[in-house]
Amino acid sequence: NKSNTKKMKFALFAALVASASAFAPVSNSRVSTALNLEYGEYDGQMWNNDSKKIIYEKFDPAAPRSVMNFNPFETFEGNSPDASGYYPGEKGYKDPARGDVSYASMLVERAEIEE
């Protein structure tokens, strides 16, 4: 009887340890934090009205939207996209490098847009 009781206690202990190890963290497990996002041709470069015009000339509205095919003048909730077509708040958005802007240059850009 004592030997059966010891065997049963050992079996219960082994089952308990096995079930507890299912919840223990696995050592050396790494979770990738890389998003593997793609970026457009002006990523890290000056994102001004001239570069937006070049991207707009390549824009094909019939093709799916991508980092290489988007309307740089399109806005979403009042925000303009970055050089890859991402909007603020989206994964992948990068604050673009912008040149100096004067009121006179803004008036010229506005006239071009209205045409």
Image (cartoon, helix red, strand yellow):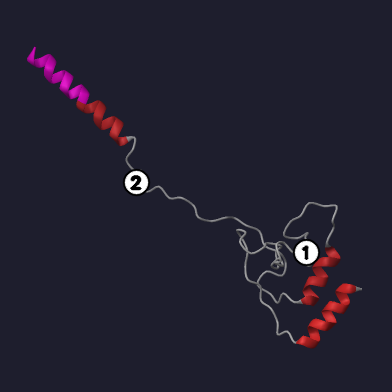
Q: Classify residue 90 as left or right of residue 41.
A: left
Give x and y (percent) for residue 34. Answer: 54, 56
Query: Depth check: 79 or 21 in front?
Result: 79
| Number of numbered discs overlaid on the protein picture | 2
Query: Depth check: 57 or 106 in front?
Result: 106
Up-down: is 92 above or below 112?
above
Q: Tell us which disc is closer to us: 2 or 1.
A: 1
Find disc 2 in the rendering and name its residue. Answer: 27
Q: Residue furthest left?
A: 2
Magenta segment's dominant SS is helix
Query: Depth check: 6 or 75 in front?
Result: 75
Q: CA distance from mark 2 to mark 1?
A: 47 Å
Residue type indicated by callout 2: Ser
Residue type indicated by callout 1: Glu
Asked which secondary structure carries label 2, the reply is loop
- Taking the spot 79% from the left edge, 63% from the top edge, the residue there is 71
Q: Which residues are magenta?
A: 1-12
Give x and y (percent) for residue 105. Answer: 80, 85
Query: Depth check: 103 or 81 in front?
Result: 103
- Taking the spot 59% from the left edge, 55% from the top edge, the residue there is 36
- Taking the spot 78% from the left edge, 71% from the top edge, the residue there is 52
Q: Is residue 50 inside the magenta stretch?
A: no
**In the rendering, which numbered label is found on residue 46?**
none
Find disc 1 in the rendering and name its residue. Answer: 74
* Quadrant position of residue 60: bottom right
Mark 2 or 1, nearer chain start: 2
Point out the image quarter for the N terminus.
top left
Give x and y (percent) for residue 27. Answer: 34, 46
Asked which secondary structure carries label 1, the reply is loop
Point out the image quarter for the C terminus.
bottom right
